[in-house]
Amino acid sequence: MNPIQIELFKIDKQWQQVVKKHPTEILFLCLGERHEVNLFEAYFKYQLTEESRTDDIYLLHYQGFQNKSDYGRSLVKEWKEIFDLWQKDTGKGVVWNVESAEYAKAYKTDAYVPIMALTRLCDLYPELKLKKIYIQLAPTGIDDVIGLSEWINECCKFVKATNNQNIKLVYTEHHTHRTLKKLKQGIDFRLNIDVGRLMQNAAAHTNREKSNPEADYQQQILTASNYLSKGKHEQANAVLERAIVIAQKQGLHEAVVAARIMLAQSLAVKNKKNEAREQYEMALARAGEHSQLSAHIHMSYGSFLLAHAGKEEAKKYFEKAIKIAEMLGNDFIAMECTRLLGQLSESKITGSAKAMAYYVKCLEIARKMPVEKRRQSSMAYTASIMLKKYGADSPEGKKLDMDMQRDYGEDWKSMAEVPKNHANPLS
């Protein structure tokens, strides 16, 4: 059994414990870091393979959620296409009626449509009533967050009304950046996966040829990441120094830069300012100014300088990071650095006019990003700063509030957390 299979086995064990503990629950919310919930989706995909030994049915859907009136029909359309192909192959002539108009007036969404379709399928094949049907909703895009919450709430309501015990919904969320906050029911559970250890074990499993320098480098980086995740900086630093030596010997320039940045950040955490600055400057000298890595370095170094040196020096690196990010289309870095420049432009003497121009641009950039990425940014925090300056009852303030409700939901202000690289230039 390889490390990934072992981890999927652990996920299966945890998942089975959750569903066994909550046999009547309709909605299961899996919470974790993005890489953790991605593994949970991989577990669902595994259940669809011939190697799976499950007796239950797992359905995974990536259709984007555009509106609450036809999302359910998009799910049924996919099921029906597969069913019709199967019928064509078997020639049994079974007709599956998926039309559902009788509940349209009673519900605000079409969430009843897929549940009715599955109920009728179970009537056609009674053996399905002995199985659990887990439907994981994983939309690649969400145009209406409130609408999706309403759709899921009504879906659970309809399942309960039909007393159908075998249909369950599953949804994955980032454990701190929750998208759906208006769900009226459901049980959530937190995945516990040591991803650093998993990656390290996976690399060791695949790297049978210990003389492969690139594989050795990756092994060092994964080991260092695992140490850093546990706060063991001295051990991580020693491993990163070995990684730099390996990469330098092989002429792996980007690998050298990546290891130096990790080392610089680790040294900064332990307040070793001079050593950290030296690593940043060596990384910048090697990275140039035309890559995503270079944009990350400029932003990271700017944050370091802001915390340990001077604001003016930090500004130069944030401005450079924005220029590189815009050239390469990295909206996230462009937005965060624009927000930081805005905060650094605040002044008791000159006021906040210049800062507001940065904040407005910051929101413009944010709205170009996918919903999930936007929610992990400081967009809500920036908007909260602007709202205080506009005044909640001013025309500008009311418009901003409405725009944020559209993008984030009614409770967007609760997401306005102070970013880790927050700058308070008036202190």
Image: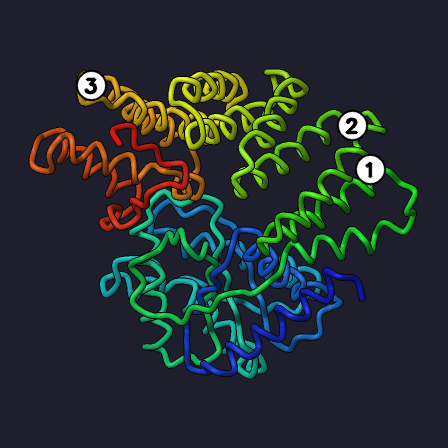
Find the distance from the CA under tag 1 to the CA under tag 2: 8 Å
The residue that mark 3 highlights is 353
Q: Is residue 404 above or below residue 368?
A: below
Observer-nearest of 117 and 292: 292
Instruction: Provide the residue designation for mark 2.
Output: 252
- Dot 1 lies on which element? helix
Q: Earlier in the sequence, mark 2 or mark 3?
A: 2
The image quadrant where one finds the C terminus is: top left
| Circle on res. 342 | none
Above or below, comparing residue 416 to residue 327 in the picture: below
Direction left: furthest residue: 393
Badge 3 amino acid: Ala
Left or right of 266 on screen, residue 372? left
Q: Give the class, few, some or many, for how many residues have Cα within 10 Å of label 2's Cα (few <14, many ≥20).
A: some
Q: Is residue 169 left or right of residue 248?
A: left
State the residue in front, 269 or 185: 269
- The answer to the question of whether label 1 and label 2 lie on touching residues, with beta carbons closer than 8 A, is yes
Label whose residue precedes the other's in the sequence (1 or 3):
1
User: Secondary structure under badge 2?
Assistant: loop
Give the residue pinned by disc 1.
214
Q: For this view, does 305 lie left or right of residue 54?
A: left
On screen, residue 232 versus residue 179, left or right, reads: right
Q: Position of residue 378 (x, y in %)?
A: 36, 38
- Distance from disc 2 to disc 3, alpha carbons, whole Å, reads 46 Å
In the rendered image, residue 42, in percent from the top left (x then y), is placed at 63, 58
* Residue type highlighted by circle 2: Leu
Dot 3: what SS?
A: helix
Q: Residue at x 53, y 54 (%)?
A: 78
For the point 23% across and 38% down, the residue is: 384
List x then y, in percent, for residue 70: 37, 51
